[in-house]
């Protein structure tokens, strides 16, 4: 018996929400998780498209589709936002590595005698 | 003996230095949940040991270094601005959406439908006074519905003005707090973590209202600019914003509703610079969204043009008809029809608010006879009934029926609400992301960040591919309900 389309779309949506959660953390490991979640979402959607039962619960399926579209837009925005953030970081660090501070002044050499305690 | 004394000095110095380091750690723990707080690091500096020069070695406390990263702080502020703006848009637009009811239970849509029904009833019994009275009553209800919607828009504008005034006051209050904190910071040694936390919390709070950029100065104070252009606070100097309303020069429509304006401390108009935050959303609602319906100096507003064109069309059909025929011998001329609707013809932005049924018209003055040729005794009510499903361009509004045109106004308002709601969801997620990213840089040094970035670069090499996957996923999602279910 084919699975209900609304339930199938909800499962895809859950995968995209996983991807969004990973993007919200945006560490390298989380980004790898995000890529995997998106891959699963794409696979499920393509497989389900052919096999899901589209006859029953069209209204529920349509609502799930709208929810899925919104989550995909959120994922796109988070990916772009994280990318811009790290791109900016890279520019700042490249500048510092070139001997200049972020404000264009000469960056000081590290004090080799200095140790630090953090808490 | 001197060796022992020297050793004691070194140990005492080290104890003092580590004591200070522990104080810094305690402050970090105590302030873990303090808004705006960034963890501090006590640096310890090794002292040279050179007996010949009397230097005993050991360690001493160096600078307390803040882990605050201004780049990460600004990223959070930007997302606070986006969230503040979208939240305000949802609030403003939800109220607007309630003015355009298309559920068929109230408002213009229902009144329009009732008027068409009354035209149809009149066409069936053109001489019946009850049917004629029904037309006048339904026309009166439609005019009232237009007036109420126009009044609702005016109220929304008044509310938006009050909110603009309150928001500007809130911005000035927060800027005043930052200015006072700056004064304290300038009087200290620039290393007060608590003061720094208060300053950053106040700036982050401010960013919900207006887009700001903040630059930390060497003395620990912050220079805060609105959208990177207009100074709000610099050191101990505050630059207050002002709100007022104005009419643009050389207006196309005289006596149109005024627009909102924000000016800087020098009186310069900076309205167009405020593109985000609660203030930006309010300005967009007040100066762009509302005028598209109710008009301003340069546009009549879609509600007014709809009301005017409908009234003119109905009046045109009625005045083309006759109340009574001419006498057979031609001694008594035909009595032409009179207009049903009146409105303020001197102000195109006041049509919907002033639309009413002519105070002098009576039921028997409704012209039913179409003079033709051929003459049709109920030709005019039939022509009015046809307005519901118009066949000619003259009876349409922008190529569609008046019912559909009003539906477009309503759906336009509904779409704005939906878009704002989605933007709010996205902004909330993006803010969480920015806060997480800020948390990641807090407490780590730049060398560690540089090492991380190698990993980030690898992860982001997959960025383009991930965007492609998302685009494909979206396309599949859009297409997915089409086969046999749409």
Image (cartoon, rainbow, N blue to C red):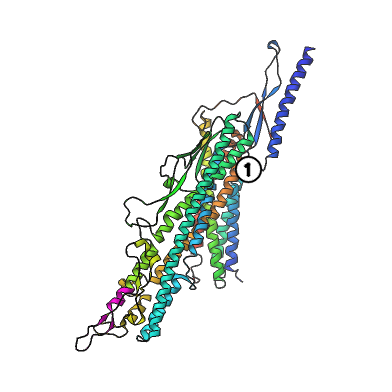
Closer to us: B332 or A6: B332
Residue A12 pos. (x, y %)? 58, 60
Residue B297 x/y as whole percent = 35, 55
Q: Is residue B456 visible?
A: no
| Residue B197 visible in the displayed image | yes
Asked whether B328 falls inside the magenta stretch, the response is yes
Residue visible at 67% across and 30% down in the picture? B42
Residue drawn 52% across the image and 54% down it: B88
Q: Residue sitting at 33 percent across and 75 percent down?
A: B391
How dense is the environment of label 1, judged by Cα within 10 Å: few (below 14), some, or many (20 and up)? some
Compared to residue B400, the image places residue B117 above or below, namely below
Residue picked out by circle 1 = B35
Residue B454: percent from left, percent from top? 56, 38
Residue at the far top in the pictured view: B52
- Left or right of residue B270: residue A73: right
Q: Which residues are magenta?
A: B314-335
Judge whether A53 appears above or below B230 on screen: below
Q: Quadrant of the N terminus of chain B?
A: top right
Badge 1: chain ID: B
Q: Is residue B385 left or right of residue B335?
A: right
> Could you say which quadrant of the image residue B287 lies in?
bottom left
In percent of width and height, residue B470 lies at: 52, 54
Q: Helix or strand or loop: what does disc 1 sit on?
A: loop
Q: Nearer the viewer, residue B465 or B79?
A: B79
């Amino acid at each position: 018996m084919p699975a209900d389309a609304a339930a199938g779309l909800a499962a895809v949506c859950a995968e995209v929400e996983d991807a969004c959660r990973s993007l919200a953390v945006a560490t390298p490991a989380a980004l790898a998780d995000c890529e995997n979640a998106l891959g699963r979402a794409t696979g499920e959607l393509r497989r389900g498209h052919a096999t899901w039962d589209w006859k029953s619960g069209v209204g529920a399926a349509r609502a799930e589709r709208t929810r899925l579209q919104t989550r995909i837009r959120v994922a796109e925005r988070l990916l772009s936002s994280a990318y811009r953030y790290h791109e900016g970081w890279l520019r700042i660090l490249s500048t510092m590595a070139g001997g200049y501070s972020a404000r264009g002044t000469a960056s000081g050499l590290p004090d080799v005698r200095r140790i630090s305690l953090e808490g | 003996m001197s060796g022992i004394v020297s050793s004691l000095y070194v140990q005492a110095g080290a104890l003092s230095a580590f004591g200070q380091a522990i104080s810094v750690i305690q402050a970090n723990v105590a302030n873990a949940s303090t808004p705006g707080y960034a963890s501090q690091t006590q640096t310890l500096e090794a002292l040279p040991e050179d007996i010949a020069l009397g230097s005993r070695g050991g360690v001493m406390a160096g600078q307390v270094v803040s882990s605050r990263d201004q780049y990460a702080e600004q990223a959070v502020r930007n997302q606070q601005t986006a969230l503040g703006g979208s939240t305000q848009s949802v609030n403003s637009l939800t109220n607007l959406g309630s003015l355009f009811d298309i559920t068929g239970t109230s408002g213009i849509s229902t009144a329009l439908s009732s008027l068409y029904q009354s035209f149809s009833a009149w066409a069936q019994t053109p001489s019946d006074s009850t049917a004629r009275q029904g037309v006048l009553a339904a026309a009166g209800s439609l005019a009232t519905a237009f007036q109420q919607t126009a009044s609702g828009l005016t109220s929304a504008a008044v509310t938006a003005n009050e909110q603009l005034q309150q928001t500007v006051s809130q911005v000035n209050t927060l800027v005043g707090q930052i200015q006072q904190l700056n004064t304290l910071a300038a009087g200290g040694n620039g290393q007060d973590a608590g003061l720094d936390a208060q300053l950053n919390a106040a700036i982050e709070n401010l960013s919900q209202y207006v887009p700001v950029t903040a630059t930390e100065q060497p003395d620990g104070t912050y220079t805060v600019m609105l959208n990177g252009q207009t100074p709000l606070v610099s050191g101990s100097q505050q630059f207050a914003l002002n709100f007022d309303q104005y009419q643009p020069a050389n207006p196309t429509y005289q006596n149109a509703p005024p627009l909102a304006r924000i000016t800087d401390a020098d009186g310069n108009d900076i309205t167009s610079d405020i593109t985000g935050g609660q203030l930006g959303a309010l300005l967009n609602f007040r100066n762009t969204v509302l005028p598209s319906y109710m008009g301003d100096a340069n546009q009549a507003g879609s509600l007014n043009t709809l009301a005017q064109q409908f009234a003119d069309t109905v009046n045109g059909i009625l005045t083309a008809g006759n109340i009574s025929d001419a006498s057979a011998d031609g001694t008594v001329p035909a009595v032409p029809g009179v207009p049903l609707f009146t409105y303020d013809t001197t102000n195109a932005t006041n049509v919907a608010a002033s639309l009413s049924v002519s105070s002098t018209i009576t039921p028997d003055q409704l012209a039913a006879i179409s003079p033709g040729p051929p003459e049709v005794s109920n030709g005019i009510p039939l022509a009015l009934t046809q307005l519901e499903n118009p066949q000619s361009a003259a009876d349409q509004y922008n190529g569609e029926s008046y019912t559909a045109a009003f539906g477009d106004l309503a759906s336009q308002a509904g779409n704005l609400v939906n878009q704002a709601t989605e933007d709010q969801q996205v902004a909330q997620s993006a803010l969480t992301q920015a806060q997480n990213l800020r948390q990641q840089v807090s407490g780590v040094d730049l060398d560690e960040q540089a090492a991380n970035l190698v990993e980030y670069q690898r992860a982001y090499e997959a960025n383009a591919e991930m965007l492609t996957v998302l685009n494909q996923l979206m396309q599949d999602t859009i297409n997915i309900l089409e086969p046999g279910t749409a």
